[in-house]
Image (spheres, rainbow, N blue to C red):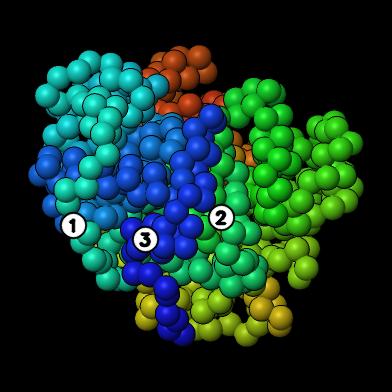
């Protein structure tokens, strides 16, 4: 089902907002307030610098940044000149960054100083020509540029490059359980279909979609729903740079109250914490939230029940999405919610269950969930064969097992792949296993995910040591520490004399899961 969109790209959204209300606040970042007019000036200034630096349409520009108004400015500036944004997970390590920057063929990098220790040396390990430090340059030279010096005066010396809906806008790095991360190529149409689909799905009017953006902006879910959607509706984005402490958490809820937010988007951990927290009575009485929307990973039944008992106003609902489909493809509505489901598809999207031989299953029958519509990615960057494996006749094969009921509500039962999701972050077992196999004392290994009470998964490793050697849990953890991001580190290391295998020698992870569950 084809649909029309009011814009073809991100930069046109800014122009539309400016024509309606120049002085309306577009972004609040702490004490910084940026109007629609100033936002355009910031964007035009950064876009001018990029062109002056030799960036051309189609060039890739990476961002390893914390949440800030600069992230949004840079994203739209990249869009204005027809380049491609590559937002990178800022929880990663140096080698992981190097791989993504090389794979995406990024020419320039916007970076936050807090990640300097892991970013150091990337201009040598990659083809990055310049690093533009947005909030304090560790070392200023011809390759390390201070952002404030390129934005100290507004200027507009470059023309808008009008892009088509099907042109590449953003590359989001994701992965399956086999191999290195892959770049999901998202077109303007992919992301706009989520934005305007959600607006129609929730019947959101202009100016009514003010969101608190506290989840990492590099995540496709955050980017589409809490950054682009509120700007597209001329509603405004309130940025929270982190919620590392209880004080930050209290400030987050204060902003929800003060700005009269109608929707609050989060991940299960946040809603679990809110259900347990002793919030002041006036928050429950005066908040304006009618929809608490959870995504990124499944909500446990326990969290849903406890949250519903504590929060009498506003409904906690679940959504579902994947980076390859530009994030949220189905959502429950506060006024039309089925317990245990992830809602109905957004307008113009189709979600159905298919059999192993790719035949459409009847409603209610279990199969692999597949998605069709404007949200389906262009493909994996420079990986045509892997793209062909997951897209057939326009249907994206999610790898998730579930069913669609007679009313069109989607239910997820399990994942076909071994992907581990920890607090909304993807962890890929083979990546950890590959590092484990480089240890001189390890003969064989397997990584699986175990669930805690909040339904978060944590990686654990099963190891078969080489004959005649001794190895400890501490030794393995110390070995992995500098190699993997903290959220990817296995919580427990188990040792077995022999790992279970099938007749061909393949390690049987399903047996390890049974051992763990027992």
* Quadrant the C terminus occupies: top right
Residue 279: x %, y % from top left: 83, 33
Q: Secondary structure at mark 3?
A: helix
Image coords of residue 438 (percent x, y): 31, 27
Number of dots carrying numbers: 3
Instruction: Identify which residue is drawn at 23% across, 32% down.
Output: 150
Residue 2 placement (x, y as % from top left): 43, 83
* Residue drawn at (53%, 70%) of the image: 197
Q: Residues within 10 Å of mark 3 (few under 14, many from 20)?
A: some
Task: Work out whether 45 lies above or below 133.
Answer: below
Task: Work out whether residue 111 can be spotted.
Answer: yes
* Residue corresponding to mark 2: 235
Residue 420 seen in render: no
Q: Which mark is residue 15?
A: 3
Question: Which is nearer the eye, 342 or 472?
Answer: 342
Residue at 40% x, 49% y is 37
Q: Earlier in the sequence, mark 1 or mark 3?
A: 3
* Kind of element beneath mark 1: loop
Residue 312: percent from left, percent from top: 88, 51
CA gap, disc 2 and disc 3: 15 Å
Residue plotted at (83% across, 45% down): 286
- In the rendered view, would you say 133 is above or below 255? above
Q: Is residue 412 above or below residue 303?
A: below
Disc 1: which residue: 159
First reached walking from the N terminus: tag 2 or tag 3 = 3
Mark 2 closeness class: few <14, some 14–19, many ≥20 residues within 10 Å: many
Query: Which of the pair 403/443 is nearer the observer?
Result: 403
């Amino acid at each position: 089902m084809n649909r029309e969109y009011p814009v073809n790209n991100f930069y046109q959204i800014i122009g539309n907002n400016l024509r309606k209300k120049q002085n309306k606040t577009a972004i609040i970042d702490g004490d910084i307030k940026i109007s629609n007019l100033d936002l355009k000036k910031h964007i035009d200034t950064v876009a001018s610098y990029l062109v002056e630096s030799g960036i051309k349409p189609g060039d890739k520009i990476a961002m390893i940044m914390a949440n800030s108004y600069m992230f949004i400015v840079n994203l739209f500036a990249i869009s204005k000149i027809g380049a491609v944004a590559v937002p990178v997970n800022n929880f990663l390590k140096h080698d992981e960054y190097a791989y993504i920057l090389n794979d995406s063929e990024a020419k320039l990098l916007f970076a936050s100083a807090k990640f300097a220790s892991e970013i150091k040396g990337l201009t040598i390990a990659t083809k990055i020509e310049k690093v533009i430090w947005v909030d304090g340059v560790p070392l200023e030279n011809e390759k390390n540029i201070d952002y404030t010096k390129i934005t100290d005066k507004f200027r507009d010396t470059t023309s808008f490059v009008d892009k088509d809906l099907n042109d590449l806008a953003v590359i989001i790095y994701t992965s399956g359980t086999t191999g290195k991360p892959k770049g999901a190529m998202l077109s303007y149409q992919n992301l706009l279909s989520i934005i305007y689909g959600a607006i129609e799905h929730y019947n959101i009017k202009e100016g009514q979609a003010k969101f608190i953006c506290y989840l990492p902006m590099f995540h496709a879910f955050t980017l589409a729903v809490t950054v682009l959607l509120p700007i597209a509706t001329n509603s405004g984005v309130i940025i929270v740079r982190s919620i590392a402490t209880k004080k930050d958490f209290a400030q987050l809820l204060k902003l929800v109250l003060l700005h009269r937010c109608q929707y609050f988007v989060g991940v299960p951990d946040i809603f679990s914490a809110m259900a347990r927290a002793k919030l002041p009575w006036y928050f429950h009485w005066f908040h304006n939230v009618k929809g608490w929307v959870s995504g990124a990973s499944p909500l446990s039944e326990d969290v849903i029940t406890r949250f519903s008992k504590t929060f009498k106003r506003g409904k906690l609902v679940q959504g579902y999405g994947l980076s390859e489909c530009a994030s949220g493809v189905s959502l429950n509505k506060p006024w039309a919610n089925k317990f245990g489901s992830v809602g109905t598809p957004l307008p113009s999207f189709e979600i159905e269950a298919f059999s192993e031989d790719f035949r459409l299953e009847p409603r209610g029958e279990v199969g692999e969930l597949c998605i069709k519509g404007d949200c389906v990615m262009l493909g994996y960057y420079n990986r045509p064969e892997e793209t062909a494996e997951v897209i057939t006749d326009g249907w994206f094969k999610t790898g998730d097992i579930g069913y669609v009921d007679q009313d069109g509500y989607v239910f997820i039962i399990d994942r076909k792949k071994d992907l581990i999701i920890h607090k909304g972050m993807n962890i890929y077992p083979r990546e950890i296993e590959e590092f484990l196999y480089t240890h001189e004392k390890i003969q064989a290994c397997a990584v699986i995910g175990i669930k805690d009470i909040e339904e978060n998964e944590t990686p654990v490793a099963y190891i078969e040591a080489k004959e005649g050697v001794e190895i400890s849990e501490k030794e393995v953890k110390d070995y992995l520490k500098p190699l993997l991001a903290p959220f990817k580190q296995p919580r427990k290391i188990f040792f077995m004399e022999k790992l279970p295998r099938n007749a061909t020698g393949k390690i049987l992870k399903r047996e390890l899961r049974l051992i763990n569950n027992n």
